[in-house]
Amino acid sequence: MNKGFASDNNSGIHPAILKGIENANQGHVKGYGDDPYTQKAIQRFKEKFGEETEVFFVFNGTGANVLGLTTVTQSFNSIICAETAHIEEDECGAPEKFSGCKLLPVEPENGKLTPESVKHHLKGFDFEHHSQPKVISISQVTEMGTVYQPDEIKALANLAHSNNMLLHMDGARIANAAVALDMDFKSFTKDCGVDVLSFGGTKNGMMMGEAVLFFTPELTVNTKYIRKQSMQLYSKMRFVGAQFLAYFDNDLWKETATHANKMAKLLEAEVSKIPEIKITQQVEANGVFAQVPKKIIAPLQEHFFFYPWNEFKGEVRWMTSFDTTETEIYEFVQLIKNLLHTNSK
């Protein structure tokens, strides 16, 4: 299959990550995380976020969100999120099934929640007929490719905490956000009041495995049982730990995310020169949203696959990855021009 712009999930594994897996594939070690690779990787997270941080590795992003949210809620609680959020749109109801919580979607502004937009859901506290709001969940990077600024995160955290609630961050593309903000991870998560963080690496060069971070240890009394019950406890966990060790070594995460973000800006710059193409969202990380003449979408997808975002408007999403090349960008843009020219005759 030719490379495309459908998703950073479609990219392969970074060679350094594969090498890390290979290096860990020696002999026998204890399973279920009681191995030196996992323990060293956990310590790396503690170095970045603080010694009191509790770290739980899982298979995938949905598992990370489910574990994080289920740990801090009960079935009578509700979770406020953007209507475009992954937990609302793309996880097949898994957060609701496993947590039992009601999701309360909010129409986002440029992909983001704001204190004003969520306040109408902050009601019914201590009223037994109403689900009890417990968590505000945000995505960083957002599903629309935008990046929350630290002050925006702090405002949501303050609102949550003032109502005895928690702030959860889905960080599937957290490395892309860190590069866009030019900040270390802790500065726009824990330091801004985030309580629970899903820390992703799969979209940025890893093979599989994510981490769930809790910044208040008291929240994690039952997390290990929930992880096992929700089928997210990996027996050969050393191969997740080994990936994160390689991911953090020499700031590989930053190198891969920087490249992906750079390719998105190049794609934005090149397609912006085409009058028939309209960029619909700010390009702040590794996603480009654009309105494209509908007649060329299918022919484009035959050569460089991508997904429609809003089929009614002809809006599409183009994602760049750690292995996207400048040549592919220029070939894609030239194909757009050729198709537009052909269809104009």
Image: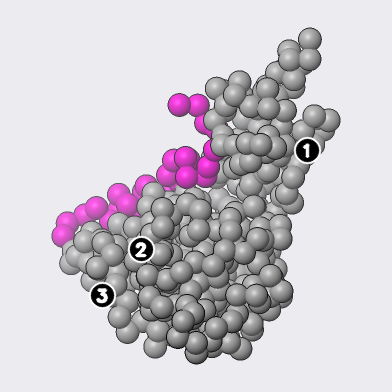
Between residue 179 and residue 292, name the one nearer to us.
Answer: 292
Residue 213 found in image quarter: bottom left
Q: Considering only vertical position in the picture, is 337 above or below 144?
A: above
**Helix, strand or loop for disc 1:** strand
Q: Amino acid at mark 1?
A: Lys
Q: In percent of the image, x 70 and y 18: which residue is there?
A: 339
Q: Earlier in the sequence, mark 2 or mark 3?
A: 2
Residue 205 in the image: x percent, y percent? 47, 49
Between residue 54 and residue 62, name the one nearer to us.
Answer: 62
- Observer-side mark, 2 or 1, equals 2
Q: Amino acid at mark 2?
A: Lys
Q: Residue 105: which disc?
A: none
Q: Which residue is mark 3?
A: 225
Highlighted range, magenta: 1-28
Please give left or right for residue 307 compared with residue 65 in the image.
right
**Helix, strand or loop for disc 3:** helix
Q: Which residue is mark 2?
A: 97
Which quarter of the rendering shows the C terminus? top right
Q: Considering only vertical position in the picture, is 341 above or below 184?
A: above
Q: In percent of the image, x 71 and y 60: which residue is there?
A: 109
Q: Considering only vertical position in the picture, is 287 above or below 229?
A: above
- Observer-side mark, 2 or 3, equals 2
Look at the image and tell me whether residue 299 can be seen.
yes
Q: In percent of the image, x 48 and y 74: which residue is there?
A: 78
Query: Between marks 2 and 3, how big is the CA–CA gap?
Result: 17 Å
Please give left or right for residue 257 compared with residue 234 in the image.
right
Q: Earlier in the sequence, mark 1 or mark 3?
A: 3
Q: Amino acid at mark 3?
A: Tyr
Q: Which residue is mark 1?
A: 278
Which quarter of the rendering shows the N terminus? top left
